[in-house]
Image: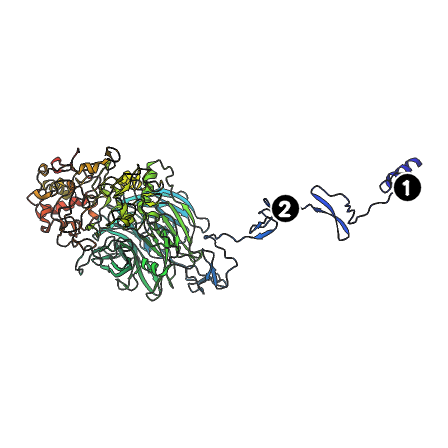
C-alpha cells in the first residue's frame, strides 16, 4: 500500500519535474518568449502572447496578389457583396453597375430627387398622379388622389362596368383580377391571373371551331367570369365562361357577317356592339342569349368602337362611337387626292337604343403637322387622320371626351422618313360631339420638341411612334394621363393633357416604356394601388406588365408559344411578319417608318401618295401572290417597274430612312464613291460582284436584288441579307378579307355581267389580275463578266399586240418590254414590263390626284398602268391609281367610259352595273376565279 501511494505521487509530480528521485525541473511559464497555451491550439491556429496572456489565433495566410483572399466571410473572396478584394488582400467599395430596371444612385439622392434609369439623380416631381403616394399614408376609408392628398373613398360601385367599354386586344376585369388577351396569329385567347407580382397565365382557349379565326378584340363582362371575342377571319363573336379559372372554355359562337374586328359592352353588360369592317355594319347582340338584336348600316369600313358609361346602370341613355378606319375625302378640299389636307377622319355616333347613325364627327387635317429639314431646307408638312385604329372614352375635370388614335398621312411629298406618316391623337368633346382641335396632338411633333437626342444614333435613344394602336388612361377623374401603344416602335408613351389644352409626353423616370414586339393593345388597371397597365404583344406573343410608378416593364408572361426552329416554315413566316411590322433597327430611322404603316394588316391604307413617278394609290398586298402558288407573283407597282419584293430596298433606305438589309463589310451595298461621279449613279446600279472586278446593274428590273441577297461574296451580312426572303414568305400568307355577305341573286347576276363585259380580260386567274412576273429574276445565262439575267433577256423580245383579242388598239404603246419615259418631258423612267401595262383612260382622270411627281414635274403612266387585283376591293376605296373614283359605283360612271368598255364595246345597263358592283364586293379567296384568256396576254413565255 505504501509503495502504490509513492508511485501515484511520482506520476503526479512528474508533470513538474524531470522524474522521481531527481532534482525538480522548473515549469515553463506563458511569456512573449515562450507562448504556451493549455490545451494546445488546433490546426490552422497558433499560440500567441498578447495582453499578458497566451491565446490561440487563426494563422494569417500569405497574400497572393494574383489571387488575393481577404480576411472575412463575405461572398467576394471574404469581402462584402458591394466590395472587392484588392491585390493587397484588403477590401474596397465597388461602384455598382446601373440596372435600369432597378436603378440605384450612389451616393443616394436628395429628398427632392429621384434616381432615374441611368442611375442619375434628377429633380423629382412633387407628386406623381400616375401612381400617387401620400405621406403619411391614408386611412382604410380614404384614397390617395392625383394631388397626393387623402380623400374619402367613393361609395362601392354597382354591378356594372366601372368605366366606358371599348374595343381592344387586351382587357381587364373590373376588379383587376383577370386579364384577357387575344392571340391573333394562332386563333386563341389567353386568360391571366392579374394579381400584382404573381401574374401568370391561367388558360388559353381557341376562339372558334375554325383554326385561323384571327381574333382581334376582347371584352370582359362585368360579372368577371365571361368574355367576348371578335373573330375577323370567321366573321363571328365567341363567348367564353369561367375565365377566372383554369377551366375557361368556349361557350358559344355567333356569326355576325364578313369580318368582325371591334366590340364593346353597354355598362350593364347586357348588350354587345360589334363592328364589321367589310359589311359596313354594327351588329347589336343580346349577351344573355347570344342572339342578334339588330344590325345597323353605317357604311364604309367601321373599325374601333366605344360606349359611354355615365354610372347609372341605365344602358338606354348611353351613346356608341364608331371609327371609320379610312379617312374620307373632304368636300371643301380643292384637290382631294395626293394632298395633305384632302381628307378627314370620321367618327359616327349611334344612340344605344338606335337603329341608325345619329351624328357624324369629322376629325380635321392638321396644316402644320411636322417640321424638319429635307435636303437642307426646312419643310413643314400637313397630315390627315387615317387608319383610325382605336377610340377610348375618359372623364376628367368634369368633361367626358373621346380620344382617337390614328396613323396620319402626309402624301404630298417629297417623300421623306419624317414627312410620310405621323401618330395623331384626336380629341372629341362628347357634350357637343365635335372635335376639340386645340387638344388634338401629333405625338411625333411633341417627341421632337420634348425629347433630346444626344446619342447620335438613329437606331437607339430617341424613338418616334409608328402605327399607334390604342390609348388608355389612368383611372382618375382629376387628371388626364394616357398611355399610347405603338405597334411598329415597340414602346408605350405617356401623354398628359392639362385642364387647358396643353399636352406633354414622356416622364422623368423614362421618356418611353419599352415593351414586347408589336404591341397590339393596352389596358390600364382600374385600381389606384400598384397602378399600371397590361400590353398585349403580337410578335413576342406575350403580355407585358407595366408599372406607372417606375415607368418600366416589370415582367412579361407568355401568352402563346413562339416558333423556335429557324428551319420551319412557321418560323420564317413569323420572322418575316416581324420585319414587315417593325420600324426599329435596320428598317427605319428612329422608329419612323414600317411596311405596316402603309399596309395595315398587309393590305392598303387607301392613300394616294405623291411618289417620284407620280400619284400612286397604296396597293393591297393580298393580291401580290396567288394563294395557290407562291411562284405566281403580280408585277409590282402601278407601272410594273419591280419584279421582286427586295426591289423595295431603296424605299427602306430612302422613304423610311433605314440602313437597309443588303449589307457588306463597309455597310449598305451601294455604288462606291458616288460623290466622284457626276451625276451620282443609282445605289444598286454598279455593284461589285463575286469576282471582285465585274460591276453589274441590279436596279429594279435590271438583274436581281434577290440574287444579291443570296450571294455571300456580295451581301456578306448573314444577319440581314436573308430578311427580304422572309418578308416575301410572310406576304405570301396575307389573307384577303372575306367578301361582303348577302345579296345572293345580285352576286350571281353580277358574275354574269363581269363575264359579258370582258372584265376577265384584265382581271382573271387566281390573283384576279392578269399581271404577272413572267420570268425568274435571279436566273441568268452565261458567266462573269458576261452574265445576262432573265429580265434583261426578256427586254430584247418584241411584243405583238396583234395577239390581243377584244381590247382597244391603243392598249399597248411600248413595242418592247423596255418602257420609255411617258411623262411628256420628265426625267428617264425605270424600265417597266410593258407587257403588263393596260391603258384604260385613268391617267389624269377628273377627281384624281394631279399628275405630277413629288418634285412637281410631270408624272409617268400616260401609257397605262399595271392592272390591280380585285381582292380586297370592298376595303380598297378610292379607285384607280390616282384615287379618281371615291366609290365603286363611281368607278363605273361615264367619267371612266374607256375603262367601262375596255373589255366589250357595249357598256352594261345601270341595273347590271349595280349587280356588278355587288359581285365585286363579294370577291374573296373562296370565290371561283375566271381563267386567264390566252389572247389577252402579251408577256412572253419563252425568251
Residue that extends furthest to the left in the rendered view of this protein: 906
Q: Residue at x 77, y 49 (%)?
A: 32
Q: Nearer the viewer, residue 826 or 873?
A: 826
Q: Nearer the viewer, residue 926 or 453?
A: 453
Q: Position of residue 714 (x, y in %)?
A: 31, 39
Q: Residue at x 39, y 52 (%)?
A: 514
Residue that extends furthest to the right in the rendered view of this protein: 2
Tell me the quarter of the picture where residue 145 sits: bottom left
Identify the residue under disc 1.
23
Q: Position of residue 443 (x, y in %)?
A: 32, 58
Q: Is residue 184 visible?
A: no
Above or below, 451 against 638 in this view is below
Identify the residue under disc 2.
63
Give the Cα separation between the discs numbered 2 and 1.
49 Å
Q: Is residue 529 visible?
A: yes
Q: At numbered mark 2, what does the secondary structure look like: helix, strand or loop? A: loop
Residue that extends furthest to the front in the rendered view of this protein: 676
Q: Position of residue 568 (x, y in %)?
A: 34, 36
Amino acid at each position: 500500500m505504501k509503495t502504490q501511494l509513492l508511485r501515484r505521487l511520482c506520476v503526479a509530480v512528474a508533470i513538474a519535474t524531470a522524474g522521481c528521485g531527481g532534482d525538480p525541473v522548473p515549469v515553463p511559464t506563458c511569456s512573449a518568449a515562450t507562448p504556451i497555451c493549455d490545451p494546445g491550439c488546433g490546426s490552422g491556429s497558433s499560440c500567441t502572447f498578447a495582453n499578458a496572456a497566451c491565446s490561440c489565433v487563426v494563422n494569417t495566410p500569405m497574400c497572393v496578389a494574383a489571387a488575393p483572399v481577404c480576411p472575412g466571410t463575405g461572398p467576394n473572396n471574404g469581402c462584402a457583396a458591394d466590395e472587392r478584394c484588392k491585390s493587397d488582400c484588403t477590401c474596397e467599395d465597388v461602384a455598382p453597375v446601373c440596372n435600369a430596371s432597378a436603378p440605384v444612385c450612389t451616393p443616394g439622392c436628395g429628398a427632392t430627387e429621384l434616381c432615374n434609369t441611368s442611375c442619375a439623380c434628377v429633380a423629382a416631381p412633387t407628386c406623381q398622379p400616375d401612381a400617387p403616394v401620400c405621406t403619411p399614408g391614408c386611412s382604410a376609408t380614404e384614397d390617395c388622389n392625383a394631388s397626393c392628398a387623402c380623400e374619402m373613398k367613393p361609395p362601392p360601385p354597382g354591378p356594372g362596368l366601372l368605366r366606358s367599354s371599348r374595343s381592344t386586344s387586351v382587357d381587364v376585369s373590373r376588379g383587376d383580377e383577370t386579364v384577357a388577351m387575344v392571340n391573333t396569329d394562332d386563333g386563341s385567347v389567353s386568360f391571366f391571373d392579374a394579381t400584382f407580382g404573381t401574374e401568370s397565365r391561367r388558360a388559353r382557349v381557341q376562339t372558334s371551331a375554325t383554326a385561323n379565326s384571327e381574333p382581334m378584340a376582347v371584352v370582359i363582362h362585368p360579372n368577371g367570369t365571361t368574355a367576348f371575342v371578335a373573330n375577323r377571319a370567321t366573321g363571328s363573336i365567341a363567348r367564353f365562361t369561367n375565365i377566372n379559372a383554369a377551366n375557361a372554355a368556349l361557350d358559344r359562337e355567333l356569326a355576325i357577317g364578313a369580318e368582325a374586328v371591334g366590340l364593346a359592352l353597354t355598362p350593364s353588360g347586357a348588350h354587345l356592339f360589334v363592328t364589321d369592317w367589310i359589311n359596313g355594319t354594327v351588329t347589336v347582340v343580346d349577351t344573355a342569349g347570344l342572339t342578334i338584336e339588330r344590325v345597323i348600316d353605317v357604311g364604309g369600313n367601321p373599325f374601333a368602337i366605344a360606349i359611354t358609361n355615365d354610372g347609372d346602370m341605365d344602358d338606354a341613355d348611353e351613346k356608341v362611337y364608331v371609327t371609320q378606319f379610312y379617312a374620307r375625302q373632304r368636300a371643301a378640299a380643292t384637290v382631294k387626292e395626293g394632298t395633305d389636307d384632302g381628307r378627314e377622319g370620321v367618327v359616327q355616333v349611334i344612340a344605344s337604343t338606335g337603329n341608325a347613325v345619329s351624328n357624324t364627327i369629322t376629325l380635321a387635317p392638321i396644316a402644320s403637322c411636322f417640321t424638319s429639314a429635307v435636303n437642307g431646307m426646312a419643310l413643314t408638312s400637313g397630315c390627315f387622320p387615317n387608319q383610325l385604329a382605336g377610340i377610348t372614352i375618359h372623364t376628367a375635370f368634369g368633361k367626358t371626351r373621346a380620344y382617337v388614335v390614328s396613323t396620319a398621312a402626309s402624301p404630298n411629298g417629297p417623300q421623306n422618313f419624317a414627312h410620310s406618316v405621323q401618330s395623331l391623337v384626336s380629341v372629341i368633346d362628347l357634350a357637343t360631339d365635335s372635335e376639340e382641335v386645340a387638344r388634338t396632338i401629333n405625338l411625333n411633333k411633341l417627341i421632337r420638341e420634348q425629347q433630346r437626342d444626344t446619342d447620335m444614333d438613329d437606331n437607339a435613344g430617341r424613338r418616334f411612334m409608328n402605327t399607334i394602336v390604342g390609348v388608355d388612361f389612368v383611372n382618375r377623374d382629376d387628371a388626364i394621363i394616357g398611355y399610347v401603344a405603338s405597334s411598329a416602335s415597340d414602346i408605350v408613351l405617356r401623354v398628359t393633357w392639362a385642364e387647358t389644352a396643353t399636352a406633354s409626353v414622356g416622364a422623368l423616370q423614362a421618356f418611353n416604356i419599352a415593351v414586347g414586339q408589336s404591341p397590339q393593345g393596352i389596358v390600364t388597371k382600374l385600381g389606384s394601388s400598384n397602378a399600371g397597365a397590361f400590353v398585349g404583344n403580337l410578335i413576342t406573343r406575350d403580355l407585358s406588365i407595366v408599372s406607372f410608378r417606375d415607368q418600366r416593364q416589370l415582367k412579361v408572361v407568355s401568352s402563346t408559344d413562339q416558333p423556335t426552329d429557324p428551319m420551319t416554315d412557321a418560323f420564317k413566316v413569323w420572322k418575316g411578319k416581324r420585319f414587315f411590322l417593325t420600324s426599329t433597327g435596320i428598317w427605319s430611322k428612329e422608329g419612323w417608318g414600317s411596311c405596316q404603316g402603309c399596309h395595315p394588316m398587309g393590305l392598303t391604307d387607301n392613300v394616294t401618295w405623291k411618289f417620284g413617278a407620280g400619284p400612286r394609290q397604296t396597293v393591297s398586298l393580298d393580291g401580290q401572290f396567288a394563294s395557290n402558288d407562291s411562284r405566281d407573283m403580280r408585277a409590282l407597282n402601278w407601272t410594273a417597274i419591280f419584279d421582286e419584293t427586295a426591289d423595295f430596298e431603296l424605299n427602306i433606305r430612302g422613304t423610311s430612312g433605314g440602313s437597309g438589309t443588303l449589307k457588306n463589310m463597309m455597310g449598305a451595298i451601294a455604288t462606291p464613291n458616288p460623290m466622284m461621279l457626276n451625276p451620282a449613279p443609282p445605289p444598286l446600279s454598279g455593284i461589285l460582284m463575286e469576282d471582285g472586278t465585274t460591276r453589274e446593274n441590279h436596279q429594279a428590273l435590271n438583274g436581281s436584288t434577290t440574287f444579291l441577297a443570296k450571294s455571300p461574296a456580295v451581301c456578306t451580312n448573314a444577319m440581314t441579307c436573308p430578311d427580304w426572303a422572309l418578308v416575301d414568305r410572310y406576304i405570301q400568307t396575307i389573307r384577303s378579307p372575306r367578301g361582303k355577305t348577302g345579296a345572293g341573286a345580285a352576286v350571281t347576276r353580277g358574275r354574269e355581267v363581269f363575264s359579258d363585259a370582258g372584265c376577265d380580260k384584265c382581271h382573271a386567274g387566281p390573283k384576279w389580275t392578269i399581271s404577272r412576273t413572267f420570268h425568274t429574276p435571279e436566273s441568268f445565262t452565261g458567266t462573269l463578266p458576261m452574265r445576262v439575267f432573265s429580265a434583261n433577256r426578256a427586254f430584247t423580245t418584241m411584243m405583238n399586240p396583234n395577239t390581243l383579242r377584244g381590247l382597244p388598239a391603243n392598249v399597248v404603246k411600248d413595242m418592247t418590254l423596255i418602257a420609255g419615259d411617258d411623262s411628256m418631258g420628265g426625267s428617264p423612267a425605270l424600265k417597266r414590263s410593258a407587257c403588263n401595262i393596260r391603258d384604260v383612260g385613268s391617267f389624269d382622270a377628273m377627281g384624281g390626284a394631279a399628275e405630277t411627281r413629288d418634285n412637281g414635274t410631270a408624272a409617268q403612266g400616260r401609257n397605262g398602268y399595271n392592272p390591280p387585283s380585285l381582292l380586297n376591293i370592298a376595303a380598297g376605296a378610292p379607285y384607280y391609281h390616282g384615287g379618281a373614283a371615291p366609290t365603286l359605283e363611281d368607278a363605273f360612271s361615264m367619267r371612266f367610259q374607256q375603262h367601262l368598255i375596255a373589255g366589250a364595246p357595249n357598256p352594261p345597263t345601270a341595273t347590271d352595273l349595280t349587280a356588278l358592283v355587288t359581285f365585286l364586293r363579294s370577291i374573296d379567296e373562296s370565290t371561283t376565279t375566271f381563267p386567264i384568256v390566252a389572247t389577252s396576254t402579251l408577256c412572253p413565255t419563252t425568251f
